[in-house]
Image: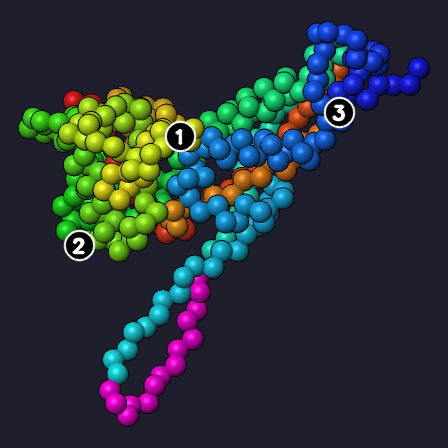
Amino acid sequence: MPAPNYPVAATSWDGVAQASNPVYDPGYGGTFIPTIWSGKLIEKFYDATVLAAISNTDYEGEITNYGDKVIIRKKSDVTINDYEVGMPLVAERPVSPITELIIDKGHYFNEVLDDVMEVQADLNLLSMWADEASEQMKIKIDSNVLRGVAADVDANNAGAAAGKVSGDVNLGATGSPVLLVPRAPDAGQTEVIDLITRFGQVLDEQNIPENGRWITLPASVCALIKRSELRDASLTGDGTSVLRNGRLGMIDRFTIYMSNLLPMGTADRLAAGETQIFAGHSHGLTFASQLSKVETLRAESTFGTLLRGLQVYGYKVTDGTAIATAVVAKP
C-alpha cells in the first residue's frame, strides 16, 4: 500500500477516500502548499500588527532570510541659495546618507498533526493555526520592537523638558510620569487630549510632516479619550469603526492606534503603574518582516506530520526626530 500524502484534502490518515463520510468535508481539492500558506500567514500578520501602520514597510519584499541586509538611502539635504541677477550659479551634488536595516531577529512555530486525528487534513484546522500563529507572532514582534524604539528617540522628543525650540513640554519620565485624566484635571494632572497636543507641538518643532502621524496608546488611555470632551465627537472622520489593527481614530493630525504591547511596569524598567507611549511619523521607523520558511515533514518521534514556520524581521529607527515618547500613569 503506498504511503499517504500528508496533509491532503481528499484522504484520511489511512489513505482511504472520504467522499462518503458525512463528517469529512474538506472543501479543498489539493495538497497543502507551504508557499501559499506562507503568504496567508504573513498577510494575517500584517493585518493584525500595529507596526505595519506606524512604520515604513517599503523594504519588506526585499528580504528572504535571516541575516539579510537592506541598504536604505535617506533624504539628502538641499541648500537654498540667494539669487541676484547676473550672478553665476553654484551647483552642488547632494549626498544621500546611507543606513542599514539588518534582518537579525526571528521566531518560529512547530506544530504536529497526528495521523490518528480525523481532522488531519481539515482546512479549517490549518486556518485556525494560521490565525493563532499570526496573533502570537504579532504579540512577540510588536512587543520586541516597541520596547526597542525608545533608545533611539531624539533627546528633544522625550522627558519633562521636551521640545527642540521651547524646551518646556512635559512628556514625563520614569518616577515622574504624566498623570492622565479624561477631563477637569486637578493640580499635577493632565487632560488626555492635552498630552496629544504636546506630542503635536514636539513634532512641529522638529518640522515633521503632518500627514502620516500616529500615536500608540494602551487600552486604558484610549478609554480616557472616550470619556474626554471629545466623547461625543466622531474620532475616525472616515466612517470606519475601530479596525482590527487597533486603529481608534484621528485627533490633532494623529491617527490613534490601541496596543496592549507597549512597555509597561517594572518588567520594562518603569515604575509600577507606568506605561511608555509613542507618537511619530511613519518615516521615523522602518520595519520589514518575512515568513521565510513554511514546511511540512514527517515527525520522527510520533506518527504525524509537522507543520512549522520561521518568521524573520528587523527594524530600524531611521529618524529619531520623527518619534516622540512619553511616560504616563493614572493619578
> Looking at the picture, does residue 213 appear above or below residue 192?
below
N-terminal of the two: label 3 or label 2? 3
| Left or right position of 251 against 185 | right
Q: Tell me what residue is drawn at x 28 percent, y 92 percent.
A: 86
Q: Measured from the top left, where is residue 211 in percent x and y?
A: 32, 49
- Proximity of marks 3 and 2: CB atoms separated by less than 8 Å: no
Q: Tell me what residue is drawn at x 58 percent, y 39 percent.
A: 290
Residue segment shown in magenta: 84-98
Query: Mark 2 sits on what residue?
Result: 165
Instruction: Tally the numbered discs.
Output: 3
Label 3 and label 2: CA atoms lie apart by: 64 Å
What secondary structure is marked by label 1? loop
Q: Measured from the top left, where is residue 250 in percent x and y?
A: 28, 38
What secondary structure is marked by label 3? loop
Q: Measured from the top left, where is residue 287 in percent x and y?
A: 47, 43
- Proximity of marks 3 and 1: CB atoms separated by less than 8 Å: no
Main SS type for the magenta part?
A: loop
Q: Tell me what residue is drawn at x 70 percent, y 17 percent.
A: 26
Could you classify mark 3 by the number of other residues whose Cα lies within 10 Å: few (under 14), some (14-19), or many (20 or more)? few
Q: Which amino acid lies under the numbered mark 1 shown in the image of this protein?
A: Leu
